[in-house]
Image: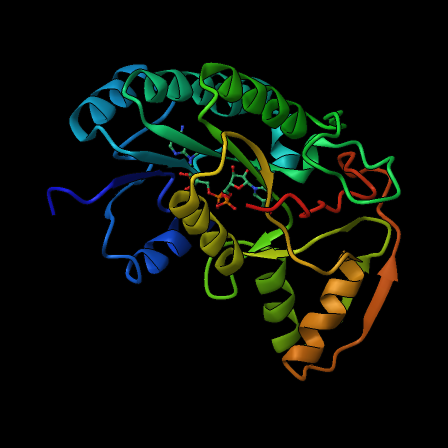
Amino acid sequence: MKNKPIILVTGAAGQLGVSLQEEAKNHPHYQWHFYKRKDLDITKPDEVERVLEELRPTFCINTAAYTNVKQAEFEKQEARLVNVTAAAHLAKICAYYNTQLIHLSTDYVFDGAQAHPYTEDDRPQPVNHYGKTKAEGEALVLAESENHYVVRTAWLYASTHGHNFYRSILNKATAGESLQVVNDQVGTPTSTTQLCAYLLRLIEKQPPGGIYHCAGETIQSWYGFAKDILKAHQLEVPLEEIRTPSTEVKRPRFSALSTTKRF
Ligand SMILES: NC(=O)c1ccc[n+]([C@@H]2O[C@H](COP(=O)([O-])OP(=O)(O)OC[C@H]3O[C@@H](n4cnc5c(N)ncnc54)[C@H](OP(=O)(O)O)[C@@H]3O)[C@@H](O)[C@H]2O)c1
């Protein structure tokens, strides 16, 4: 137990946090510590400092985030506190204890005006508050240490848990509901299984610090994704493609992530 590299995971009750707890069972050569919000609130500097001092982890995977894109428009300060202020402080304390931070970020840092997948070198230009906070957060994280990682992912879903598009489509279709899904937002749906494997590989290989993209291979609209989900589960319900209602929070029209940066 003593010489195993220590991995601290924040936000452990969230979608990715739960998937990482599952994945950890396959990696007993690491000493895993999963902290839910009630055990470690990253907006509380003294809690962060206490846990880092106690554990002295080799890696910290920060999955904790304010992730409600709609609500972020109404709770701007709350979203900023978690995604910017707390992320920056966590990065600073990690750097102090020589802990490599793996900070999760999002395709929503981009504006969607591009016609080809966004690379790690493309300039963030978010169109909503959630995206703005995530973009600011990632810049501050990287400024704290050249060893820290920002891993951007997109349209994340776990098939077994969490609130996500995949499960919402599946639940509605299983209940026999007809579906209306937007066809004018295009991205790269990514399973937490793929992301967990990616994070583990990052930890094992330890490429240079910086930004990395982990996203699914298929570039599609939410409508196309819904079609695939129904097909995979042999569900047949009416599925109508619609445009994004004008009342919706602004989101990038095209936010596919390029995953050509290898390590
Ligand atoms: N979901 C997506 O489609 C998507 C896409 C791209 C990138 N990402 C990024 O991927 C990461 C993981 O996302 P996810 O889908 O796992 O999100 P999630 O299911 O919303 O989980 C986030 C977790 O963070 C916790 N949290 C919030 N504020 C906290 C705080 N102050 N201290 C500690 N924990 C706190 C939440 O707890 P409560 O439930 O108690 O609030 C929740 O358990 C995030 O950085 C997100 O921005 C997600």
> Would residue 135 appear left or right of 236 to someone viewing this image?
left
> Would residue 45 appear left or right of 249 to someone viewing this image?
left
> Would residue 60 appear left or right of 79 to someone viewing this image?
left
Q: Position of residue 145 (x, y in %)?
A: 45, 18
Above or below, 252 against 196 in this view is: above
Residue at 63% over, 57% down: 165
Residue at 19% over, 45% down: 4
Residue 73 seen in render: no
Q: Position of residue 76 (x, y in %)?
A: 60, 20
**Quarter of the image holding residue 99?**
top left
Above or below, 51 against 119 in this view is: above
Residue nearer the viewer, 252 or 102 = 102
**Quarter of the image holding residue 50?**
top left
> Would residue 207 appear left or right of 68 to someone viewing this image?
left
Q: Position of residue 60 (x, y in %)?
A: 35, 34
Residue nearer the viewer, 113 or 240 = 113
Residue at 54% over, 20% down: 80
Residue at 63% over, 29% down: 130
Q: Position of residue 49 (x, y in %)?
A: 26, 18
